[in-house]
Image: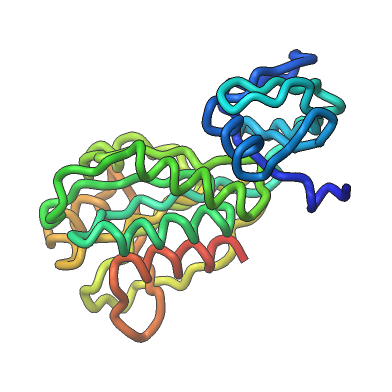
Amino acid sequence: MSVQQRPYFYEADLNAQCSSFTLSETTSKHCVQVLRMQIGDEIQLTDGHGLLTTASITLAHKKHSQVRILDRTQQQATHSQVTIAIAPTKNMGRIEWALEKLTEIGVSEIILMKTERTERTVVKLERVEQILISAMLQSRQVYLPRLKGLVAFETVLADYQGFSHKWIAHCLDQDSKKSLSPAQKKESHIILIGPEGDFSSREIDLAMAPENQFEPVTLGNTRLRTETAGLVAGVLLKI
């Protein structure tokens, strides 16, 4: 069976030293009951932090299958750090779709951000994380984006002072807006994407103040929905 044909799973507790491993109940059930896998069948596992292993099933059990690790590699993150801080929309389904696609294209971190005009005040992070995991596995990646939320706008400004490039995408007309270009290796980018009613004037001024130094950026000539803006920003930084 080729590498691309082996079923691919996420196991958060996987480590580089183990020679055998007990699969989680979720993975075990999928292997045994859904895929009908048996002893000797091979799968691939990742911990979402760059570790990729090939393993052979030694015990096929619907709750606690066991595998023997055949080989392992620790893949280094060679790409740049791209963080998307985005205000969740009232319709959570729209933002979940965008986060799925951002994971597929390989962003490093996603922050669900609370702004003055953010209508949604509660986010089920466990559900969102499962969406990110599924997208990581579907695109056969070994790095799972870090997920934070809900994080106050001011906290985001304070926590990312050291980034190479800091952007804010807002809807006010400004001649000084720049265009995004792909992030280069070892660079760190963070871009702020506002809610459906845009950032407030106070928030824009605060982000662009000398102590924070976020620069305004354009994402094109049309006004985009929040989730579309987040995806466009991710693509522009990752291509």
In the rendered image, residue 222, in percent from the top left (x then y), is placed at 33, 85
Q: Nearer the viewer, residue 157 or 233?
A: 233
User: On the picture, is 209 further left or further right than 217?
Assistant: left
Q: Nearer the viewer, residue 119 or 52?
A: 52
User: On the picture, is 43 further left or further right than 214?
Assistant: right
The image shows residue 17, relative to residue 104, as above or below, that is above
In the rendered image, residue 113, in percent from the top left (x then y), is placed at 26, 47
* Count of numbered marks: 0
In the rendered image, residue 27, in percent from the top left (x then y), is placed at 59, 33
- Image quarter for residue 46? top right
User: On the picture, is 116 further left or further right than 23?
Assistant: left
Q: How is the image coloured?
A: rainbow
The image shows residue 73, relative to residue 3, as above or below, that is above
Quarter of the image with the C terminus is bottom right
In the rendered image, residue 30, in percent from the top left (x then y), is placed at 59, 39
Give the residue displayed 55% in from the left and 67% down from the top: 181
Give the residue displayed 44% in from the left and 65% down from the top: 231
Give the residue displayed 60% in from the left and 20% down from the top: 64
- Image quarter for residue 223? bottom left
Give the residue displayed 31% in from the left and 64% down from the top: 94
Q: Nearer the viewer, residue 10 or 194?
A: 10
